[in-house]
Image (cartoon, coloured by chain):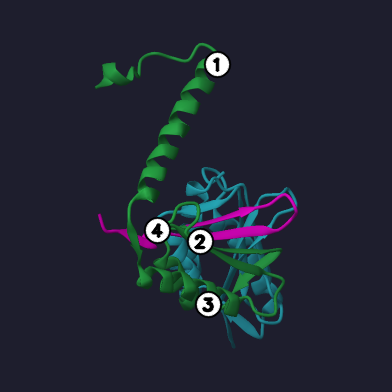
Amino acid sequence: MSKEFNFDEEFTTDEEVEAMLDTVVTTVGNEAVIEDNRTAVINPYKIQQVLYTYKVLKYLTKGTDAKVSYELHSPFKSMGSVTITGKNLIFRKTEWFMKAVELSANFEVYPKTNGTVEMNFTFHGLTKPID
Amino acid sequence: MSSFVKCFDAVSMVVEEATNQFSPLWKLDKEKYRILEQYCQVIDGLSDEFDGISYDVEVDDIAMTIAVTLECQDINIQQQSHKYYALAQRAITFGFSTSEDGNLNVKFVFPSVWNKV
């Protein structure tokens, strides 16, 4: 297997790095397209979890400059996310916030160049393949 | 950072100063202070995990709460049980903002460690 993937050989030019990156990105993209092309049904429980997270975060940030948004079936149909952006994100009802975190698969916070902070909750399993 | 600067080193300096300021009406509660030290150890763990850059500690003169801010690049957690969540649940408030240097400020506000004499 190690020979097949040739872990010992190192990149020697920029072109080699670019070529392998193109291959990797194309392969991942193709796999995602195949997954997206499979027949699937909506998982209502998971959609409800995204809805809860969106609504509870809107509630927790009410009266602040924070903007809360959500995306369903993006970047793939089985995925969704809730995003909060604001200059100073402060939370008091910690137990509600933690429930939102528990429901999501991934939680990330990072600073943006415009002086705001962005927080993302990512969800998987919004759809279930049936074939 | 965490190899030579510990969160509790910064916290203890600020708490000591505040204790002198609040004295003689208020006295440091050793048990509460010990719990705060445990919170600081968790924050040191967060600093290790998320490449902490600096700590900032403030005591609110009125509410007597203690705010500890960890500056780091970002936070990314891919598990439902994590020390960050455990710590946030013990804070009065927690939050995020951008630091002056464009990094992420992760702030926890903890309860007072002083009792009225």
Look at the image and give the residue range highlighted in magenta. Answer: A107-131
Dot 3: what SS? helix
Which colour denotes chain A? green
Q: Specify the amino acid type for callout 1.
A: Glu
Disc nearest the viewer among 3 and 2: 2
Q: Mark 1 lies on which chain?
A: A
Residue at image coords 32%, 21%: A5
**Quarter holding residue B9:** bottom right
The reply to whether callout 4 and callout 1 are in contact (CB within 8 Å) is no
Q: Name the residue under label 4.
A: A124
Distance from label 4 to label 1 (Cα)?
35 Å
Left or right position of B96 against B6: right
Residue position marked by numbered label 3 in the rendering: A56
**Front tag of 4 and 3:** 4
Q: Are marks 4 and 3 in contact (CB under 8 Å)?
A: no
Please tell me the numbered disc located at residue A15.
Answer: 1
In which chain is the residue bearing label 4? A
Q: Mark 2 points at which residue?
A: A81
Q: Which amino acid does label 3 sit on?
A: Val
